[in-house]
Amino acid sequence: MRHFLRDDDVTPAEQAEILTLAAELKAAPFSRRPLEGPRGVGVIFEKNSTRTRFSFELGVAQLGGHAVVVDGRDTQLGREETLGDTGHVLSRYVDAIVWRTFEQSRLDEMAATATVPLVNALSNEFHPCQVMADLLTLRENLGDLHGRTLTFLGDGANNMAHSLLLGGVTAGMNVTIAAPPGFEPTDWVVEAAHKRAAETGARITVTNDPRAAATGADALATDTWTSMGQEGDGRDRVGPFRPYQVNTELLRLAQPGAVVLHCLPAHRGEEITDEVLDGPQSVVWDEAENRLHAQKALLVWLLAQR
Ligand code: CP
Ligand code: NVA
């Protein structure tokens, strides 16, 4: 039995297998029914969501199952039932648990008692389901990802930067993170990424220079400068980030055929301009759609590991 809590919870070969399955499911959405019954999947949100909520609820239905989608505050988690007890109990009802929460340590705590696969639907530290969709989108546009360059610009210490780094090097991509001083990726994540990169031959660059980072990249990715839960953290999350905005000028430095990723929701005019988000190099709507296909593949794969 396997959990999917961070991007390096799957090996490079397993990640590739899930991405290939995702492409198959995209071509034939109703071809796999591992949850026929219906068997249940628990989907719990402790933060807002549009894409993750729709894609998991529909994805589970398309796999023949039934998703019980709840706001964490409405469950007894909101009244301090322990994560461990919740893991025990939910495992008696459902075949998988999908959870959007705060600290990664909360996922680790529930994983210790869950006897069904637990999937991270976004934590403060990682957003690995999003990155599976991003890698599927990159495969569709770039083909083989080995040796291609993915540059993230923005808050290098947020969940998307961390997951693109860890998931990107797992796919064999050279990953560059460009962030303002003080917003670089967290050391232990960079260490984990180096470990993974040693297996795949990927290169890692962390820089404060957005123009150097964008130059020659095959893909540019960005994300909000203020993640959910950071609204009141007292840090200036606009001024230092302005040079890292993904705009036409920065995009011109990338490869001519480079694509632009954004997990969404976008803060138009902050981390990305309308011109780029709505422009011909943006693949953000495919990326959002690919959440559905990538997550279905992930669930099919996880259910088959038991
Ligand atoms: N990208 C993403 O996870 O979107 P939601 O917050 O809308 O689920
Ligand atoms: N970094 C963002 C991603 C939203 C999908 C956040 O955590 O709010």
Image (tube, helix red, strand yellow):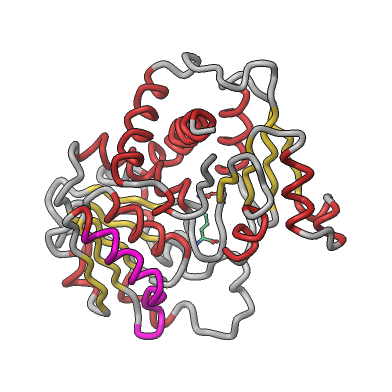
Does residue 111 belong to the magenta stretch? no
Number of numbered callouts drawn = 0
Report the front residue among 46 and 226: 46
Name above or below for residue 125 compared with residue 47. Answer: below
Report the front residue among 109 and 59: 109
Q: Which residue does the image show at 15% across and 45% down from the upper left?
A: 257
Name above or below for residue 23 compared with residue 164. Answer: above
Q: Which residue does the image show at 35% across and 27% down from the upper left?
A: 23
From the viewer's perspective, tell me whether residue 239 is left or right of residue 96. left
What secondary structure is the stretch in magenta mostly built from? helix
Name above or below for residue 13 compared with residue 237. Answer: above
Give coordinates of residue 48: x percent, y percent: 65, 54
Give coordinates of residue 31: x percent, y percent: 47, 14
Q: Quadrant of the N terminus?
A: top right
Q: Quadrant of the C terminus?
A: top right
Magenta segment, which residues? 181-198
Which quadrant of the structure image shows residue 61?
top right
Name above or below for residue 252 compared with residue 23. Answer: below
Q: Which residue does the image show at 22% across and 70% down from the upper left?
A: 205
Give coordinates of residue 27: x percent, y percent: 37, 19
Which quadrant of the structure image shows residue 268?
bottom left
Report the front residue among 116 and 98: 116
Report the front residue among 285 and 98: 98
Does residue 190 belong to the magenta stretch? yes
Give coordinates of residue 197: x percent, y percent: 24, 60
